Amino acid sequence: MKRLFGLILIFLTASNIFANSFDIPIRNYGLSIGNSEYHNGLRLNLYDHRVRKVNGVNITFWIPEKNRDFDMNGFAFGLVGPRQNHMRGIGLGVVGVAGGILDGISIGGILIGADSIRGIAIGGLVCGADNFAGIGINGLAMGANNISGITINGLGMGADQIRGISLAGLGIGGDYISGLTVAGLGIGGNYINGVTIAGLGIGGDGIHNLAIAGLGIGADEISGISVAGGIIKSDYLDGLSIAPCVWTKKNQQGISIALLNIADNLHGLQIGVLNIAKNNRGIAKVLPIINFHGKDYKNAADRRNDSD
């Protein structure tokens, strides 16, 4: 057995040096030992270099080199990690999995990286891609231009666009975030839409639908239901807001419930210990228990124009 393994190892090394292979029973079919360019069946190679297509099982033992046109269909295993231009099936790497397009299941002991990932990706530490769609589970973090699907990360994740269910132990950040987003510490984005829950804070240009934070929520515009353990602060507030302090710097439409409510322009109801509506007259500017201003109703766009 040791002699057989030794002969196979020698042939693997020699085959990569001379860019050749030993195929059983015929070339390109069955068992291939070495750097075959095309193969259908079981292929064993030290490292892949300028491989074109493999259908079946591909097993390598060292760092792959240039494989710009490599299409892999089936199961690819790398002691370091498989790397193909397009992989369809299952990719498993002790260190990681890399490629242009990964379709199927990708599992990397440390990392996964590709231009596009579609399917299930499990990275021991991190996963990165231009576009990700599917289920992603990573010990530390995930980063991409566009993420859609279900993602779970031990620390955090960031992307230009995030859609779906996103869970992170620490933080989540993106230009556009929609769906269910939950982070242990904070969530930040230009536009956040859906159900957003953070242990400490949520911040963005616009936060819409349902936002819950242990400490604070801050945005230029907040609409829907917002609940915070400390403060809710915004320029424009529409909907129901509940916190010890609700501070609307420009226009508030809806209901705010807090110990301290402050609004430059109130178009709704404040309920709390102290309620300040600067657009009211006389003593109605500062009232205990309830403050109300019901006239001059305008939609959000008109209110922004008036304030600007």
Image (cartoon, rainbow, N blue to C red):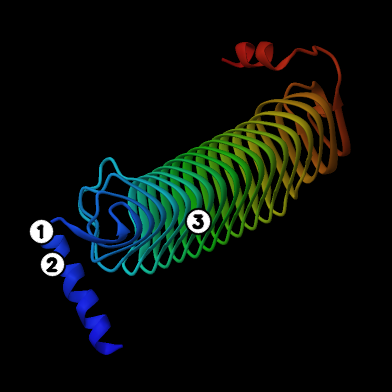
Left or right of 68? Residue 237 is right
Residue at image location 49% in from the left, 65% down from the top: 139
Specify the farthest residue to the right: 289
Position of the C terminus, as image quadrant, is top right
User: Residue tagged by mark 1?
Assistant: 18
Position of the N terminus, as image quadrant, is bottom left
Left or right of 45? Residue 74 is right
x then y, percent, for residue 268: 83, 26
Specify the farthest residue to the left: 18
Left or right of 54? Residue 280 is right
- In what element is the residue under mark 1? loop
Which amino acid type corresponds to the residue marked 2 in the rendered image?
Answer: Ala
Residue at image location 24% in from the left, 56% down from the top: 48
The numbered dot on residue 156 is 3
Label 2 near label 1: C-beta < 8 Å?
Answer: yes
Q: Earlier in the sequence, mark 3 or mark 1?
A: 1
User: Residue tagged by mark 2?
Assistant: 14
- Report, in whole angstroms, how far the alpha carbon at label 3 lies from the one at label 2: 44 Å
- In what element is the residue under mark 3? strand
Quadrant in the picture for residue 79: bottom left
Residue at image location 53% in from the left, 54% down from the top: 171
Mark 2 burial class by Cα count in 10 Å: few <14, some 14-19, many 20+ = some
Label 1 near label 3: C-beta < 8 Å?
Answer: no
Mark 1 burial class by Cα count in 10 Å: few <14, some 14-19, many 20+ = few
Q: Please tell me whether residue 38 is drawn above or below residue 287 in the rendered image.
A: below
